[in-house]
Image: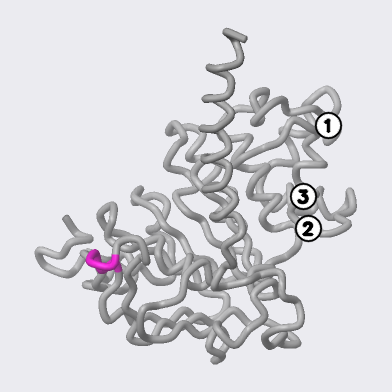
Amino acid sequence: LAQISPNVTAVSKAAGAAEELFTILDTASAIDAEKEDEGIIPEKCEGKIEAADVNFTYPSRPDAQILRDYNVTIEPGQTVAFAGASGGGKSTLIGLIERFYDPTSGTIYLDGRDVKTLNVKWLRSQIGMVSQEPVLFATTIFENIAMGGNNVTREEAIEACKLSNAHNFIMSLPENYDTLVGEKGVSLSGGQKQRVAIARAIVRKPNILVLDEATSALDNESEKIVQAALNNLMATTNMTTLVIAHRLSTIRNADKIVVLNEGHIVESGTHDELLQIEHGIYQN
């Protein structure tokens, strides 16, 4: 009996916490990606992206405006880099394109259509993403890459790895594509993990590729190898590519560099053009 009392208290606390948790889990999302019968599914995606007079604040922080009167056009197949200080809104456009959030005002267009009119699942299937710290699962290299698409064949995985400069190092491993990578890819170096993640992002041939600080966590040598893979990818495919980065080496070859400051676009142009702006943010 002496042991029952504290356990009753623990169960009571757990029940209260569970009730709050299930309330959150049961809350319907304002943007539902599982409704396959809602929204337009275009026959093809060219990859033209436009933001028109976009303003945005996060619902949890309505007083902190992230984007202000934001206007940008990204042509199909173009590589556009976004630069600026942390918290300046560089990554926010990505969340709006994928409809994790909708703008407070203004419109995001894909190929001339308001993204809010598109089928959300189709929209997100057009976009591949490589983040700063990719997650690899404790299975084989091939199976990790195959998670990027549906019914991915060995040939498709190899093609993606050749584009991401991963094929040669994979073939040097004891089991090649059947090599187990360990929990979180522990058996691979940072540069190797990132190249596998790039292959996973492009194996389904997305029309839009997002590189969100894809090399910022790497040492200089690994960064050079991964950057060479990205340069090869951008030179040999027609994907519209959005690059978010701090490192100059990552963005200098972009077709256009957009510089943000406190949610505003303050400068835009090529690397050479921006260097000509006297006392410019990019120059400094």
Q: Which of labels 1 and 3 is toward the front?
A: 3
Mark 2 surroundings: few (<14), some (14-19) or many (≥20) residues within 10 A: some
Secondary element at image label 2: loop
Which residue position holds label 3?
147
Residue 117: name its quadrant.
bottom right
Residue 175: name its quadrant.
top right
Q: In the displayed orientation, state which residue is furthest to the front.
A: 1
Mark 3 surroundings: few (<14), some (14-19) or many (≥20) residues within 10 A: some
97 is within the stretch colored magenta: no
| Residue at the (57%, 8%) spot, across then down | 2
> Is 102 drawn above or below residue 227 in the view shown?
below
> Is 76 drawn above or below residue 207 in the view shown?
below
Whether tag 3 and tag 2 are in contact, CB under 8 A, the answer is yes
- Front in this rendered view, residue 94 or 27: 27
- Image quarter hosting the N terminus: top right
Secondary element at image label 3: loop
Left or right side of 202 for 279: left
Q: Residue 176 bears which disc, if any?
A: 1
